[in-house]
Amino acid sequence: MADPRYHADPDQCVDAILETVGREVVLGLPLALGKANHIVNALYRRAEADPGIRLSIITALTLEKPRSGSELGRRLLDPIVDRLFGDFPDPAYARPMREGTLPDNISVSEFYIMPGRWLDAPYVQQHYASLNYTHAARAILNSGINVLGQLVAGEGEEGDQRFSLSCNPDITLELLPHIRNRRGSKNPLVFAGQVNDKLPFMGGEAALAASEFDHILDGPDVQFPLFAPPRQAVPLEDHAAALHVAGLVRDGGTIQIGIGSMADAVAWALVLRHTQNDRFCELIDRTIPDPAVRATLDCNPFREGLYAATEMFSPAFLDLYRCGVLRREAEDGAILHGAFFLGPLDFYQGLREMAPDERDRFRMRVVSFTNDLYGEDEAQRRRDRRDARFINDAMMVTLLGETISDTLEDGRVVSGVGGQYNFVAQAHALDGARSIISVSAARMHKGRSTSNIRFSCGTATSPRHMRDMVVTQYGVADLRDKSDMDVATAMLSIADSRFQESLLQQAKSAGKIPSDYTIPERFRNNLPGRVREALGEARREGLLPLYPFGSELDETEQRLAEALKWLKERTATRMGRARALAAAFTSGIDLKKEETALGRMGLTRPGTMKEKIWRRLLVYGLNQSETEGR
């Protein structure tokens, strides 16, 4: 194989690509961080200017710099975005895709979308492809892909270089044999890499010889800051659920977790279990009213530690490693096998600064390895993944155990299936493994509390015959191998008590629960106040912090973010706005006490009536969100 052609100018790279594949371009891009943005944008601009070029893009999880829909939100968010994302180049196709203004000769299809970002974008909803992550490579090949553009890390000098797939070997490693087979044929699959100096060089299967690439884009003008989403705040409800989850994890076992506040909450609970065991056990006793459930939990510190087999290598795993929880080695010496990663800046920095032999303990693999069991090394995977706990979030769970994680009842896609179904299936295929679905028992929707435990729902990510374990802030429901009656009563025991009676009546009407059944009294206090009462003191003393592993936001920004979230939930309706305004202007608010927060939002000296209203609402939101979060 020959060395790749090197380019410093993305337009020259595009010229070379078009020379090979012609004017019909089917471009495959990795999920999330691994997109070669300068190559993508140069191809997009070329097709936009020349209708004779047809450009089809197949990808997932398009990343854009965050933006707020409200003016008050922008005052908080814009400086944070400038600080954290800098000159990150948004994919040129993202805005036209949102606005429905893509040129006729350009199309984009995604199999996983940024959660909640595209609900009101008809083009995205119409062109979404519902796929298990492990089926994505097949779908990409069937689309007729002839160009693959990937962000890579480089090592060595030109002529003696290697390139790492780093954050995204997930699908590319499965496409690599096809790239090799088609090189020099009448139907080539061009492999173009863009080097980013900030990307950690991950070894093992993710490290490739330069000759595997056809083109390499590299140089100072095509460097850009990595997309680095900040840590999310962890509400008390997530901490409560995570404590339950942590007790279900077996020492010497295997773990998989996702991203976001629940991942951080689970990691923090595992750290507490290991490093502050007495306090961890005390919190378990406070939050689980059912002695039978408490008896099933393992609350001891970790002697052997855990190994991770996870689709996403999230920052939480690095936190677990540093605290001594993630340390059990698989047969190849790895303590973690992951398929892709994404995280805040200190996560990337931590990986970059590791010694190579330490970084090699974190092995990036093809997604069919992490998300599935089957292949030549199935026996080894089964041995490595002993006592596995696959922990995933859901939007809703039905009373009969169906999991809804990606799609609303009207068919609109919130995110995607990703690997959730794969991990649920693994839990049933592995001895000693369990699937743990975490769901908040209730949420605020259009200014009202709504149950996330439903009697039924029109869509399902995982069907009821795959039901296993469900956790809310109120407890654990073990559904595996249970009858519909036992499943329904178990789910009622962890539902929000404001909705239990309605759910019970629906189940009785359907004949799923006997007409004389009553919910035991110990489950009748599943209310937000119970969580605050049980964990409020731990929150105040810093045992269950809002940001367990730190934050890129300063203390004032953290407080403002919580206040704006609280206000958004409470002012979603006309009545809610009226109530909030009345309370903001009639309650005793000390504006001087919040001078720092008001200054950060440019509201120290409001110049308009609108700004005066914002100032009162903001201070009211600061007071209320802190009171309810304690």
Image (cartoon, grey):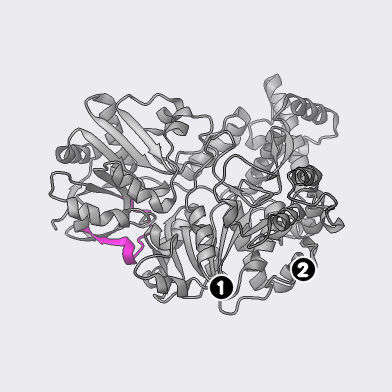
Position of the N terminus, as image quadrant, is bottom left
Q: Residues within 10 Å of mark 1 (few under 14, many from 20)?
A: some
Image-based side of 306 in relation to 290, left or right:
left
Residue pictured at 71% horizontal, 20% vertical: 609
Residue 226 visible? The answer is no
Q: Is 469 above or below relative to 116?
A: below
Count of marks, rendered view: 2
Q: Name the residue under label 2.
A: 292
Image-based side of 474 in relation to 36, left or right:
right
Image-based side of 244 in relation to 133, left or right:
right
Q: Is residue 200 magenta?
A: yes
Query: Residue 307 at what x, y percent from top left?
Result: 50, 71
Residue pictured at 84% horizontal, 57% vertical: 520
Q: How crowded is mark 2: few (under 14 residues within 10 Å), some or many (20 or more)?
A: few
Q: Give the range drawn in magenta.
A: 195-210
Residue pictured at 46% horizontal, 58% vertical: 311
Query: Residue 602 at what x, y percent from top left?
Result: 63, 31
Name the kind of residue labelled 1 in the image: Gly
Quarter location, residue 538: bottom right
Q: Mark 1 points at which residue?
A: 324
Q: Which of 599 and 97 is in front in this view?
A: 97
Query: Residue 163 at what x, y percent from top left?
Result: 28, 58
Q: Circle 2 sits in a helix, a strand or a loop, which is it?
A: helix
Tell us which disc is closer to us: 2 or 1. 2
Q: Earlier in the sequence, mark 2 or mark 1?
A: 2
Image-based side of 16 in relation to 163, left or right:
left
Query: Residue 570 at what x, y percent from top left?
Result: 73, 34
Q: Are marks 2 and 1 in contact (CB under 8 Å)?
A: no
Q: Does the magenta stretch include residue 503?
A: no
